[in-house]
Amino acid sequence: MSLSYRQPGVVLTDRRFTVPLDHDDPTGESIELYAREVVASDKAHQDLPWLVYLQGGPGFGANRFVGKQAWLGRALKEFRVLLLDQRGTGHSTPANRQTLPLRGGPAAQADYLARFRADAIVRDCEAIRPSVTGGAPWTVLGQSFGGFCAVHYLSTAPEGLRAVVITGGLPSLDAHADDVYRAAYPRIERKVAAHYARYPQDVERVRQIAEYVLHHEPVLPSGYRLTAEAFQSLGILLGGGEGSHRLHYLLEHAFVRTPQGTALSDAFQEEVQGLLSYAGHPLYALVHEAIYGQDERPTAWAAERVRAEFPQFDAAKTLAGDGPVLFTGESVHPWTFDCDPALRPLREPADLLAARTDWTRLYDPARLAANEVPVAAAVYHDDMYVDTAHALTTARAIRGLRTWVTDEFEHDGVRAGGPRVLDRLLALTRDEV
């Protein structure tokens, strides 16, 4: 039985659904999906169109809003909203180091995890849509990876869509993971340069921290092994609107004097382990490169291999000279699984996924070229997470898609810009702008 309850200005209802693990085998094993229905209190008994939200990631459950935060307030003016925990995330049959051993050994775990990409998520949406909307099409809001899912939706089941709104999530239709990271490292380098231009004092500060970490490899209180490469990956913050400032404030309290000499402060270690740990979203690490697999070529730890083409990111070599240490971000590496205690038991399944050669295509260029669903997408001018050139190429390939290219926001624009971003994109789907 569904449970309804209230927060300021909204009525919430917990919804649970059963779907096949493998939609090609509907009589086989099933998994549970969880979603939270949200409607404005003064519209709770109205017959409203539906908007389903697909969170970024992969590997994150839907936002846990309080009341009408961020974009939700704008959506609730006209929609009943479904905040879906995509399979394996949140309350939807979670996949992590505690649950995956129930599948069996590493090979069985890898086979299971291969079913957690955009294709399965979209088929989940179509499986639950009739019971949610009564069969009516719904509007999809896809943030980041949620936008990747939305483009797959347009490729395979456009009949289920009333409109599509994408924020920072137009994928390349044909790029291999190597191409994705080859485009990513120069973007990250630009973001790091901008950070050091804003906070020049951080250049020496980062060198000092990197030098300390390189020689001590401290183990954080959670058991996370902080290597120089792991420290550099804090650059993932630089893709958000406030990320540069957050990184600066983190760095400025890195060291403390102790009777044994200078050491990393407890406060720094506590914050760093919270930023680097995948305990709350292990699927991000496990299937992050798999979301780009579309042919018989393995992803084969693409971010790690491609990084070798950019020696300026090698902290040890940089420290041997006098240049600035570069951060990285938005990439997962084999050593990630060695550093993070939440991932260590999953290293072998991750290696097997990286070696997989039977990925199916996710996007249908011919169907997208004939698209009839209203689509609007926010493309951020120098998005650190999703390549702008790739995104604009895809925008041109989807018939009728309207873009809003802006440098007002970073990748988290739908959170930072909230109602204004969603309002503009909805207007674009209706030819009101």
Image (spheres, rainbow, N blue to C red):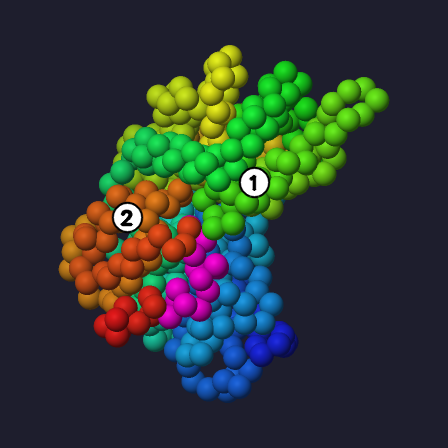
Is residue 210 inside the magenta stretch?
no
The picture places residue 163, in percent across and down from the top left corner, at 30, 68
In this rendering, the answer to whether 5 lies above or below 257 is: below
- Horizontal side of 116 relative to 16 (left or right) equals left
Q: Amino acid at mark 1?
A: Leu
User: Closest to the observer: 389 or 87?
Assistant: 389
Above or below, 427 relative to 126: below
> Which one is in front, 393 or 282?
393
| Residue 233 is at least partly visible in this image | no
Q: Earlier in the sequence, mark 1 or mark 2?
A: 1
Q: CA distance from mark 1 to mark 2?
A: 27 Å
**Is 364 in front, or is 384?**
384
- Give me the disc on residue 247: 1
Q: Would you say residue 419 sits in the magenta stretch?
A: yes
Q: Is residue 96 left or right of residue 312?
A: right
Residue 391 bears which disc, if any?
2
Can you give x and y, in whole percent of width and height, for residue 121 in the image?
Answer: 41, 54
